[in-house]
Image (tube, helix red, strand yellow):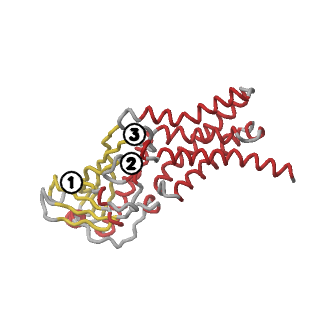
Amino acid sequence: MGLEIKKYSSILLGIGIGVLYGIVSQFMIRQESLKGLLGIMSVGFIFILPLALGAITIYFSPSNVQNSWLMRIFMPWVTSVLCLFFAIVVGWEGTICLIILSPIYLFMSSVGGVIAGLLLNTIKQTKPAFFSLGFLLLLPFGVSSIESRFPPNGERRTVLTEILVYSQPSVVWKNIIRVPKITENQDGFFYKMGFPKPVEANLSSEGIGGIRDARFERGLYFTETVTVWENEKKIGFIIQSHPESTPIKTLDTHVVPGGEYFDALYGEYEIVPVNENQIKLKLLSQYRLSTKFNFYAAIWSDFLMRDIQSNILRVIKSRCE
């Protein structure tokens, strides 16, 4: 019994030290005094920090764990999940950011666990192994501080969704230029994660120059100025976000439209007749993405925009049919 307790306490030691390192690191990068040097939205803390979490978990685990490929890959997941869960509990991150971060945290922590296992097998002397681990633990801070010298990559991205509607162009047109209060069921992945659902869209006047007021739940809204107007064919509008008016608890700060990392720029509906009883309704959106890791963030931001647009098209389709 004593051996079993000792065995499990040794395993928990690696996880515990890893979680402590993760919490302290997250606390440090959120300090106002370090904002110019370190940043949460950086390669250092999105990709390298979980790698260090995996390494420290395996480094402080018993030898049977260090030598097991299965444990090297999957045991760091426990540390990563606990760190992310802690960030949710204390309000450092929201559910949407948790979903976005989870895949990369799990993958990179496994990479860190494998590196630590191989390192400990290769280097038998404690001192060199310790210095190698120390390098990994300092790496997130080093990478992030180097990144802080370079501005994020601003990228304009376009997402297009479409749906077939059994109706007339005139009927569809009336339902896209203005959207009366939505009472229909709205289903989407990000809505389940807490993203505000659209409520209604009002139009001040028809034609170019008209102002469309698009309202979402929990105080999120957009001002849309019409720049394209082809009656019963196409409407396009420039989108202005209002991050300063968005209540703090509406969205994670990292995904607020108009914020440092993301903004909606342009929207466009197009009606394309298929036959006398059916049309194809297209919805195009353009948005800005500004992170140090657009190659990964774009996967989720495109998914988010496509999810929102598909929901809106389904609502319009049900109303027109």
Q: What residue is shown at x 40% (from left), y 58% (from top)?
A: 251
- Classify 10 Å Cα crowding around label 3: few (below 14), some (14-19), many (20 and above): few
Disc 2 target residue? 302
Amino acid type assigned to the residue bearing label 3 in the image: Gly
Q: Which mark is residue 175?
A: none
Q: What residue is shown at x 32% (from left), y 39% (from top)?
A: 154
Q: Is residue 296 above or below residue 123?
A: below
Judged from this view, the residue extending furthest toward the right is 1
Image spot of residue 150 (x, y percent): 37, 33
Q: Nearer the viewer, mark 3 or mark 1?
A: 3
Distance CA(mark 3)–CA(mark 2): 29 Å
Q: What residue is shown at x 81% (from left), y 48% (from top)?
A: 6
- Classify 10 Å Cα crowding around label 2: few (below 14), some (14-19), many (20 and above): some
Depth check: give the residue in front, 184 or 195: 195
Q: Nearer the viewer, mark 3 or mark 2?
A: 3
Q: Are marks 3 and 1 in contact (CB under 8 Å)?
A: no
Image spot of residue 51 (x, y percent): 58, 38
Indicate left or right for 178 with 118 as reference: left
Depth check: give the residue in front, 274 or 72: 72
Q: Are marks 2 and 1 in contact (CB under 8 Å)?
A: no
Amino acid type assigned to the residue bearing label 2 in the image: Asp
Distance CA(mark 3)–CA(mark 1): 36 Å
Image spot of residue 37 (x, y percent): 43, 37
Image spot of residue 242 (x, y percent): 27, 57
The answer to which image quadrant residue 210 occupies is bottom left
Nearer-N-terminus badge (3/1): 3
Nearer-N-terminus badge (3/2): 3
Disc 1 target residue? 237
Q: Is residue 135 above or below residue 297?
A: above
Q: Which mark is residue 36?
A: 3
Res 280 seen here: no
Res 141 seen here: yes
